[in-house]
Amino acid sequence: MRALIVTNMYPSARRPALGSFVRDQVRALGRIPGLHVEVFGFAPGGPRAYAGAAARLRRFAPERFDIVHAHFGLTAWPAIAASGRHHAVTMHGTDLTHPRSRAITLAALRFTDLAATVSAPLAERVPRWAAPRGVAVLPCGVDMQRFRPIDRAEARGALGLPRDRPCLLFPADPSRPEKRHDRALAVAGEVRLLALGDIAPEHVPLWVNAANAVLVPSDREGFGLAVLEALACDVPVLATPVGIAPEVLADLPGAHCGAFDVGVWREALAPHLAAADPRVDGRRHAEPFSSDRMAERVLAAWQALDGPGKRDGVRNSG
């Protein structure tokens, strides 16, 4: 099977953290025998960026792909220009929550054979008229090889952090309002709060393992990969009940999932701040959502397009 991934979320030298989860899925797909995957990535931008991508895609694939899969709703439009037996799109969040992006995304679904989101709650935002055949849930997953427990002192040493002082991690760019850096600051109080901006993906596990706990107090999450990344490192995590958090944090001692309340969150955090190397039994909770398992789910969804009730014909920009 030959697959083409089209996305405006993909790491570059200028933005190494952009879409690292998409790259993780591409790499996991590439480990599946008999599957050949190519990537067409382009920088996010206005209408001209998408029009330019469509023009390049018309020349990009003189041979038909078995599947052309777009990541992020708006990229479904230029992806239609690539020749493929089937077209698919995975929606990640903002493409369904921002009013203008939502309208453009939903309009593109009639040109796709497979509509997917990264979480079940996000799938509920897709109206039946836009995806009458239903919506698949296809998360990108966490790279369990990259995200693994690392000795906390070693991680702090590599980052130049004091080894004997507690610190916390806000695993997002503080400038993103929906991630609620203000809440993380309120919980941290006088404890040092680290934050991820445009950190290279290969360095992120050091930041996770350096922290006594990871704080994810978001208003909303399309999926909530940061929770899984913390669990893959066996690092305690506190999160609001959005995205994947309620499912993977349920009944996990040392983790907390609940509505944001400074007092409650500080109480849950206190034992982790008092311990030199606090850990939770997180990897077994993250493993079902590994990038390799999620890649297998993606492949199964692609293969199902050729099963009973398949739609024939080539999707193109015409």
Image (cartoon, rainbow, N blue to C red):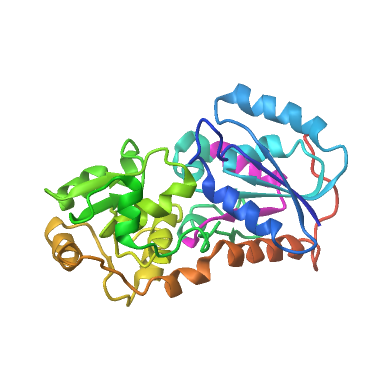
The total of numbered circles placed on residues is 0
Q: Which residue is at the front of the view, 222 or 268?
A: 268
Q: Is residue 128 visible?
A: no
Q: Which residue is at the front of the view, 173 or 161?
A: 161
Give the magenta range: 103-120
Q: Is residue 265 visible?
A: yes
Q: Is residue 107 magenta?
A: yes
Q: Which residue is at the front of the view, 314 or 248?
A: 248
Horizontally, residue 285 falls left or right of residue 95, namely left
Looking at the image, is 304 positioned above or below residue 130? below
Question: Residue 126, percent across and down?
Answer: 53, 52
Q: Quadrant of residue 223?
A: bottom left
Horizontally, residue 236 falls left or right of residue 32, namely left
Q: Is residue 252 magenta?
A: no
Horizontally, residue 3 falls left or right of residue 291, namely right
Question: Residue 230, percent across and down?
Answer: 38, 61
